[in-house]
Image: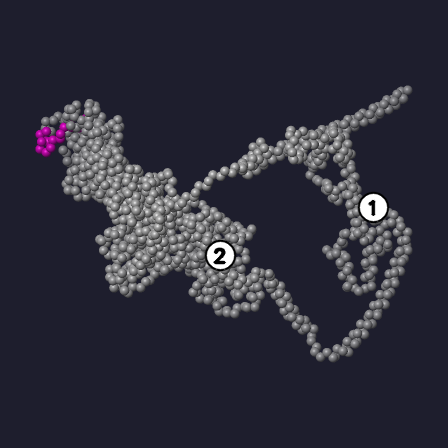
Amino acid sequence: MSEVSAQSVLAHLFQMGKVPKKKRSVADKVRKAKTSFEIKNNPFEVKINRKKFDVLGRKSKHDVGLPGVSRSKANNKRKETLLKEYKQKGRSSKFIDKRFGEYDTQMAPEDKILKRFALERQRVHDKKDLYNLNEDEELTHYGQSLAEMEKFNDAVDSDDESEEKGLLSAELTASHFGGGGLLRKKTGGQQDGEETHRAKSRQELIDELIQKSKQEKRERQVRKEESQELTEKLDQEWKSIQALLVKKTPKCDRAEEEKPKLEQYDMMVRELVFDMKAQPSEKLKTPEELAREEREKLQKLESDRLRRMMGEEVEESSQSQSHISADDLHDGFILDKDDEKTLSYQVGDKRRQAVCVEDGDAGEEEEEEEEDDNADEEGRRRRRRGSRRPAMMKKMVTLTWSPSKKIKAQQEAAKAELPYTFTAPESYSDLKDLLQGHTPDNQRLIVARTQKSNHASLAVGNKLKLQKMFGFLLEYIGELATRSPPELVAVDKLIPELYSMCQMFPEAACKAMQSIFEDAGHTMEEVLEVKGHVPFPALDMLVYLKVTGLLFPTSDFRHPVTTPALLYISQALTKCPVRSLQDVTSGLVLCCLGVEYVTFSKRFLPELINFLAGTLHLAVKDKTSLGSYTVVPPFRPTGKCSDLLVLSDSESCASWTKKSLPLSATRHLELRSDPTQTQARLTCVSTCLDLVKRCCLLYKDLPSFTCIFRPIRTLLSEHLSAQTLPELLQILESIGGAAVTRCRLVLEKKKPIPLKLLTPKIVEVLDYGKKRGCNREEREKERLKHKYKKEFKGALREIRKDTRFLAREKLTEVMDRDSERKRKVRELFGSLATQEGEWKALKRMKSK
Amino acid sequence: MAPSKRRNVILRITAEQSGKRAKIDLNTKVKDVLQDKKNANDVFDILELLESEKEKDVVNAVNACSKLFSTLLEKKDLFLGKLPTGEEEEAFIGGLSAEEKYRLFMRQRYSSCVEMLLEHLDHELYSVKESALCCLMKFAEGEGRHPLEDLDWSEHYSFPRELLQGVVDRLLSRTTENSMLISRFQEFLEMEDVRYYVMSSIRENVGKVLAKNKGALIPVYQNNVFSLMSNISIPSQESGLTNFMIKQEAKHDDWKVAKLNEHKRAFEKMWLGFLKYKLPSNMYKKILVILHDSILPHMSKPTLMIDFLTAAYDVGGAISLLALNGLFVLIHQHNLDYPDFYKKLYNLLEPSVFHVKYRARFFHLANLFLSSSHLPLYLVAAFAKRLARLALTAPPTALLIVLPFICNLIRRHPSCRVLVHKPSTQDESVEDPYLMEEEDPAQCRALESSLWEIKTLQSHYHPDVAKAAGSINTPLSGLEDDISELLEKTTYELMERDLKQTRKTVPLEFETATQLLKGGGDVLGQHFCLG
């Protein structure tokens, strides 16, 4: 069915539909006829809203209203929307009018008609041929377009029929078979005129065509004969020359030779395609620039740290990374860089860090490391060198294939044990199973790989998994430290992983650490309440304290992790009685940690000094002549454990050389022979002295420096002999040498109270009698409330009007139906009456 | 009597020894004995069981005895008067009727039973001890109601003093710790008459035992005495004396036991008798801890404690600190004049004050003593300076007490402001003129000094301490800080404050951690290795 006919039918239908709707109020009709100007000037149409006050300079929109106009507008709108909906109610099928611009309200109906007509004409015009009505449809045979098939056929049989074939489909069909006439009748009536004109010249036209085709046929035959002659001639000539060609290669060989050539070319092309195109990049920085940037970054971090140390309030923004993309999930994933490095504090590039980690290891180790880095992207386990861009990689793999197979084989063997991906452990025992039985290096690799294969950017739950894993890892470290002997090497290897995870999830790391300190602090408090003293913290707590120092800044004025950690150290140093050399060692480890914690901020840690003084007191031989200094608990002036560090023989002192004590000495110390005991004592004393020295340097600026170090000074100068301890004199010097720079304490000056200002304070009053909130939010809230109320009322009014309108419509519908029925009934009655009349008349006639 | 029969009994009892049956047996036996005087010999079976090895049997037997003899006491079926001894017995019995004989027999059994029970108070098992004690107290009650002495009760007050004395003697054992039993005994001490007689018994016992030892320490015994005595508390008003074990029908109001003053006197005598002798140092502390609120108020003349307290105050250390509390009560309520009190208090200030358990109590009292506005300026300054000096060795919890304490001192005595504010014309450095070793606060030149120590503490590692120390930088506000809530603060509470705080961002260390021992100045790495 053609569009034209469809449209006409539709138009007809619509006009039919409009018939019952035609009832319009008279006012509407009148208004429609009038122009807007007329309406506005008509005093019966206009309603003037009287104003109470005239406000100068205020323009009122609503001083004149046109109630009639607005009512009819609303009515029309309802008819267009609500009424339609009402009519459509309960119907599931829908009538969509696809005519041009049917639903375009902007367009004038005249325009619409014009445009539709133009389109119609255009469509007709586009048709190449009048008679092929199915032009749009493509005929197929076995799924192939017939037209296409026809074209190919041309090439196959080079018969002369080819040219005629095209004609056959077009004009000839029409002219030869006359089917066109039948089809033509269906087309619109407008073309009838043309058709009659053509019908006249039909006979002539056909004759002409036949003549034309015959002529062409003849011409073609002649041309073909000529070309055949020419080719035969050429062949003969070629045969005569053929003998002259010396090298005769078989045809198949030639084909093979060509192939590799082609591939080489292909390769070149592909190479060029895959090769990095020159992209605009940042210009290379000069070393000076790099150094400057580095310095600036460090300065920024440093100033940040200093500010926190002074206890100033930290704005949230300063914490965040300076260049966060809008899509950043805050999971530490940075697309372009290696995954390993994350978050804000990025000092030094990755390579250097890796080297630094593997410090002192063999070159093979280095390569292993490199491979580890790329393990997940390079599933085929091929080695590569130099560039790390994946695009370049493919080429490089083919070119530099295994230069040193031996090393590779070794690596393969080594790697065969460890898989490349791990599932994140769900519980602590999972993690333990994962790491149990591996060498420390491999444990580190496993943790690193687990971390990578469960990177937060890879799946939704991964972030949580890794956060949990941090807790488990901490627990694991604690367990490693509590084993006997403690596996501190493994702990050491895990530190970089802990650090990187901590950088990724600071909050989770903070929570995990806090819970450790909470537990430890709580148990310590409980034991203290019951017994009054506690044993020194075990090695795992010492390790935790150290790890805290590595992961979190210890110089902050107040930090959620390091402040409790320091409190814990201080508590341990004051409440744990020293009863053995192990205790002394534990205490000294705590002291070391304390010194490390306060090194940067130079904060005063009284417990540290107390403990050092107490430790030195343990080395004093003659405890009876104490006098000038007092020891602070947990140490006692005399008692059974107060001679722990007294050196029995001075000869062994001469042979003693400083060796660092193992951390495990805090728990277990082999002291079988007397010399080793002396050695251990000497080590403790020397450590203690070194710490004293450091403290001297740290606290030399404090105003009470001499008071703080007085006990230690008297201890060193009067009670310990300088022969056995050569460092002694140095320290004494540094204590004595500290300049006393004390000024009288003076209160800070108060700021002068500013004079009273006499200029009047101007407060804007913009109330106009309306109550309004004083600040912006309240005003905004008030405004929105008001608006809501207004809108609500308006909507209510509209809904009421809608229902009224619908009711009216229903009523008219009912009335229409009733009147129709009445009419029909009357009609029936009328016809019946006439029938009756006729019958009666007939009867009467008969009777007559 | 019939030894052969008794042997039979033993055989029979050893033959059948199932617990429950034995109990039922016992009950029936008790019933038999009570019903018919013919069955009187069954008493031996019960008494035999008292010496059994089995705990259950003994307890059952004790219960049976308690039932039996209290019923007999009530029925007045026990012989009244003094029991004849030795040779007299035969003659004595001869002149008695059958009824009398029965009573005498029962009375003898009763006294042997009491003896056995008293021995059981030293039993290893607590349950045996407890039931024996209860049983004895029940006997005591019965004896009180129905006295065994044949006296004119309108003249005398009946109370089984001997029995109670025996119980107390056993309770205050020299070899075993009886604190559990003593706390069980406390229930009976609620009764006024029991308490009164127990107090006098204790006094007698203590005098006897400690005098015999010539003042040497017997820690177990003294511990027992202390736990028994510390359980004794006297109602504060005469009207509170209502709970008596034995009501004296006649002349109740004239009875000594019914008078609060007598109670107080007995209490006082008891304590003084105990404190007269040398005490172990932990006992000293224990006594001093409870002295001010459970001993001094119950004494009729608290001033009698002066000697003890001054001696304790002179001991030094924690004991002195504790004695302070008692002294305070005496000074405050009983008008005690103590020479050089403040000097001694000043000398009590040692580094250990910040570390001992009684820190809170000490500072509470020190705050009270120094709250007077009539104290001389030099004294207040000396205290402030000394506390500040000691603060250099104090843990953070103590610092949080001491710093507001010093600030309060300066507030109360505005002239002390020179300690924190002494503008001088020349900007030279000054030596600290304060003499730490000087014992006399008047001579220590504290007023010439300044509180540099607090300035030092401004760089303390703990943020709260640093802030508290920072308050001397600005003129102090008029209101005193309330230190009472700071007194009991523990380190864990301080830790918790930081641990519980939730912060949006956690600052991190920016130096990459590579090894366990690296970082933070490498102090640990220099002295220790992983090994």
Q: Nearer the viewer, residue B11 or A44?
A: A44
Question: Badge 1, how many Cα within 10 Å: few under 14, some, many 20+?
Answer: few
Q: Earlier in the sequence, mark 2 or mark 1?
A: 1
Question: What residue is drawn where x is 81% and y is 61%?
Answer: A162
- Residue A535 percent location from the top left of the image: 32, 50
Question: What residue is drawn where x is 53% and y is 51%?
Answer: A329
Q: Nearer the viewer, mark 2 or mark 1?
A: 2
Residue marked by disc 2 = A297
Residue marked by disc 1 = A188
Question: What residue is drawn where x is 75% and y is 56%?
Answer: A145
| Above or below for A630 versus A235 | above
Describe residue B7's horizontal placement relative to residue A180 as left or right.
left
Image quarter of residue B84: top left
Amino acid under label 2?
Answer: Lys
Q: Is residue A613 magenta?
A: no
Could you tell me which quadrant the N terminus of chain B lies in?
top left
Describe residue A658's horizontal placement relative to residue A750 as left or right.
left
Could you tell me which quadrant the C terminus of chain B lies in?
bottom left
Provide the major secondary structure of the magenta segment.
Answer: loop
Question: Badge 2, how many Cα within 10 Å: few under 14, some, many 20+?
Answer: some
Judge whether residue B42 can be spotted in this image: no
Q: Nearer the viewer, residue A142 or A733?
A: A733
